[in-house]
Structures are given as C-alpha cells and as structure tokens.
Image (cartoon, rainbow, N blue to C red):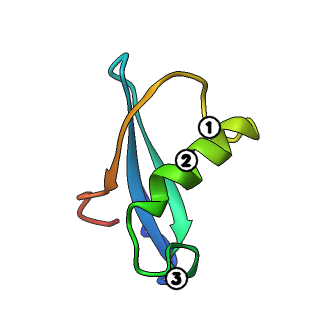
Amino acid sequence: MARPPSDMLAFNVEYEDGRTIVMLVNRHNLRGVYGLARIIARERQEKGELPEGKIKSVTPSRHPHG
C-alpha cells in the first residue's frame, strides 16, 4: 500500500464476515475524533463506495506505511 498523503489517515474497516479493507479519510473531516471514521464508513457504504455487509469495526490502520 502506498503511503497516503499527509492530510489523509488510513483506517481498517473490518466486516463481520472477516473481510477487511483500508479506507482513507481526510484528517480534517475527523475533527480529531476517530469515532467519526465509523460514521464516514457507513456513509460511504450507502453511496456504494464501500462493499455491502455488516461493519464490525473501524480502527486506525497500523500498516507501516499508513
């Protein structure tokens, strides 16, 4: 995975079926509250930008380049 631009943060979106995808979020949209990433994930899912399925968790990525 390429390093995201400095204004972007990577989050792991884990689904109940075991899938995990990485979602990039502009740090300014979070306003310092990482809990907003889950809301953003659901909004993106409704728009078809993320796969369907029950989201289990959204956590900051620990990827060495993220």
Per the model, the C-alpha gap separating discs 2 and 3 is 18 Å
Residue at (64% x, 37% y) in the render: 45
Give the mark nearer the N terminus: 2 vs 1.
2
Residue at (40% x, 55% y) in the render: 11
Vertical side of 30 occupied by 61: above or below = above
Residue identifier under label 1: 50
Residue 62 picture location, percent across and down? 23, 58
Per the model, the C-alpha gap separating discs 2 and 1 is 7 Å
Vertical side of 6 occupied by 34: above or below = above
Residue 51 picture location, percent across and down? 60, 29
Vertical side of 26 occupied by 18: above or below = above
Give the mark nearer the N terminus: 3 vs 1.
3
Residue identifier under label 2: 41
In terms of depth relative to the viewer, which is nearer, 52 or 7? 52
Amino acid type shown at disc 2:
Ala
| Number of marks in the rendered image | 3
Amino acid type shown at disc 3:
Asp
Amino acid type shown at disc 1:
Leu
Per the image, label 3 sits on a secondary structure element best described as loop
Q: Can you tell which of label 2 and label 3 is closer to the viewer?
A: 2
Q: Are marks 2 and 1 in contact (CB under 8 Å)?
A: yes
Q: Which of the 4 image quarters holds residue 16?
A: top left
Residue 35 picture location, percent across and down? 39, 60
Is residue 11 rendered to the left or right of residue 46? Answer: left
Q: Residues within 10 Å of mark 3 (few under 14, many from 20)?
A: few
Per the model, the C-alpha gap separating discs 3 and 1 is 21 Å
Give the mark nearer the N terminus: 2 vs 3.
3
Looking at the image, which residue sits at the far top? 17
Residue at (58% x, 74% y) in the render: 29
Q: Can you tell which of label 2 and label 1 is closer to the viewer?
A: 2
Residue identifier under label 3: 7
